[in-house]
């Protein structure tokens, strides 16, 4: 099978749209009281530190219209203002990288070339001169490092470095998979997505926002279980709601494509299976969380603060997935709908209550 690009074929039956069932929303979500101010300021930071990464002004504006700057304020709604802003800027930074990883004219053109760029980013994290260099990714990484590491314990600082390394490693693996047209099995996909989705820094920033350090408890079996279920829930939600974008980009490291094209399910069957897994992981997370809260560790203020933060991370992440034009097309505006039919090819899509009459058109993977 060649590169996954969608082209119209008049004689071959295919799929143009799919139905996303209503996903469970069993966890709370909230917006930081200064969410708008933080998003605006974070957009200014992107322009200052990462604007040179974009080929032109319009490309930068398309990125800023995706509202990636609000992911932080939604996922850490009760953090101190400065920490919420730092987290917002970090998420913008990694999303810029993720955007160009999917672009075959940019980082996505070569996994070896991308690895060289990623190695340079890691070198600049701990280099005092990085802020004066012309390498925008390195300047941005160094700026974030100086602001965020000051609020972390030594063990958390080491984890911050490791989390960025893991993210960049996962991105490089995704590039290689896409360029070689390799579709992995489900568990391999989940392992790579654990890195490329940024699971390590998602956990760490939940601690940072709450002002606690869970480093010693992360190895406890119940905490490991909490992290497995919470991160898989978020990864699968992301893979479902970002499917239009991943489909258009020909990305292979996504659970939808794995179930559809590797395991042989029909597209709608794959979507339905993943929706069931979202509910499974969400309920399993809640069950383990409740066991921890009912036990001795649940008496600790830091544990309770961290688990409250995890609830808000999961709920807030899903809220963002629904509202961002990143997944529904430049110019989309969310109306609060969370279920319905989605067109895979429309420039701007919304959830519709019924399939489009245009679904009779035929399409083929080439």
Image: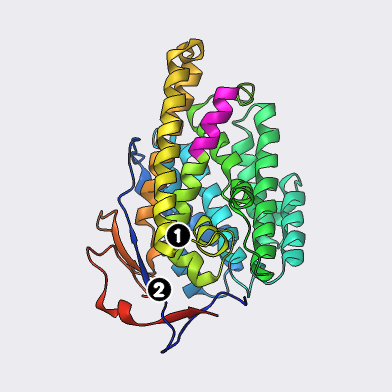
- Disc 2 element: loop
- Where residue 134 appears, x then y in whole percent? 71, 63
Q: Which residues are magenta?
A: 221-230
Q: Quadrant of the N terminus?
A: bottom right
CB of mark 2 within 8 Å of CB of mark 1?
no
Is residue 332 at least partly visible in the picture?
no
Q: Label 2 belongs to which residue? A: 15
What colouring style does the render use? rainbow
Between 79 and 350, the residue placed more toward the observer is: 350
Residue name at image x 59 percent, y 31 percent:
151
Q: Label 1 belongs to which residue? A: 242
Residue 223 lies in magenta, yes or no? yes
Q: Quadrant of the C terminus?
A: bottom right
Magenta stretch, main secondary structure class: helix
The tag earlier along the polypeptide, 2 or 1, is 2
- In-image side of 359 versus 311 (left or right): left
- Disc 1 element: loop
Image-quadrant location for residue 48: bottom right
Is residue 352 at least partly visible in the picture?
yes
Between 174 and 280, the residue placed more toward the observer is: 280
- In-image side of 182 versus 46 (left or right): right
Q: Residues within 10 Å of mark 2 (few under 14, many from 20)?
A: some
Residue 92 lies in magenta, yes or no? no
- Where residue 89 appears, x then y in whole percent? 52, 49
| Residue sitting farthest toward the front | 264
Instruction: Report the Cα–Cα distance between label 2 and label 1.
Output: 17 Å
Asked if residue 228 is positioned above or below residue 57 in the image, the reply reads: above
């Amino acid at each position: 099978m060649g590169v996954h690009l969608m082209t119209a074929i008049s004689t071959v039956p295919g799929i143009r749209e799919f139905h996303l069932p209503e996903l469970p929303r069993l966890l709370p979500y909230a917006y930081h009281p200064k969410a708008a101010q933080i998003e605006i300021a974070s957009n200014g930071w992107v322009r200052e530190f990462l604007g040179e990464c974009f080929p032109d002004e319009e490309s930068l504006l398309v990125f800023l219209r995706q509202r990636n700057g609000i992911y932080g304020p939604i996922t850490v709604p009760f953090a101190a203002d400065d920490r919420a802003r730092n987290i917002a800027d970090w998420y913008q930074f990694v999303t810029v990288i993720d955007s160009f990883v999917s672009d075959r004219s940019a980082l996505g053109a070569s996994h070896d070339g991308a690895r060289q760029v990623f190695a340079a980013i890691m070198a600049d994290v701990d280099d005092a001169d990085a802020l004066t260099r012309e390498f925008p990714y390195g300047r941005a990484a160094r700026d974030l490092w100086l602001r965020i590491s000051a609020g972390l314990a030594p063990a958390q600082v080491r984890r911050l470095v490791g989390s960025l390394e893991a993210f960049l490693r996962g991105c490089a693996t995704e590039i290689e998979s896409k360029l070689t047209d390799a579709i992995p099995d489900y568990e391999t996909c989940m392992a790579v997505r654990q890195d490329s989705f940024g699971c390590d820094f998602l956990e760490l920033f939940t601690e940072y926002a709450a002002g606690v350090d869970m480093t010693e408890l992360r190895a406890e079996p119940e905490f490991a279980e909490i992290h497995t279920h919470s991160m898989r829930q978020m990864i699968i939600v992301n893979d479902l709601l970002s499917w239009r974008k991943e489909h258009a980009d020909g990305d292979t490291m996504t659970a939808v494509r794995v179930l559809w094209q590797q395991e042989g399910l029909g597209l709608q069957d794959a979507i339905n299976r993943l929706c069931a897994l979202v509910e499974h992981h969400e309920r399993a997370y809640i069950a383990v969380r409740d066991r921890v809260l009912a036990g001795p560790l649940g008496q600790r203020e830091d544990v309770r603060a961290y688990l409250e933060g995890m609830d808000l991370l999961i709920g807030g992440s899903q809220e963002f997935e629904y509202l961002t034009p990143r997944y529904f097309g430049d110019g989309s505006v969310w109306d609060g709908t969370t279920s319905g039919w989605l067109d895979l090819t429309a420039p701007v899509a919304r959830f519709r209550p019924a399939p489009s009459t245009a679904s009779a058109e035929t399409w083929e993977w080439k």
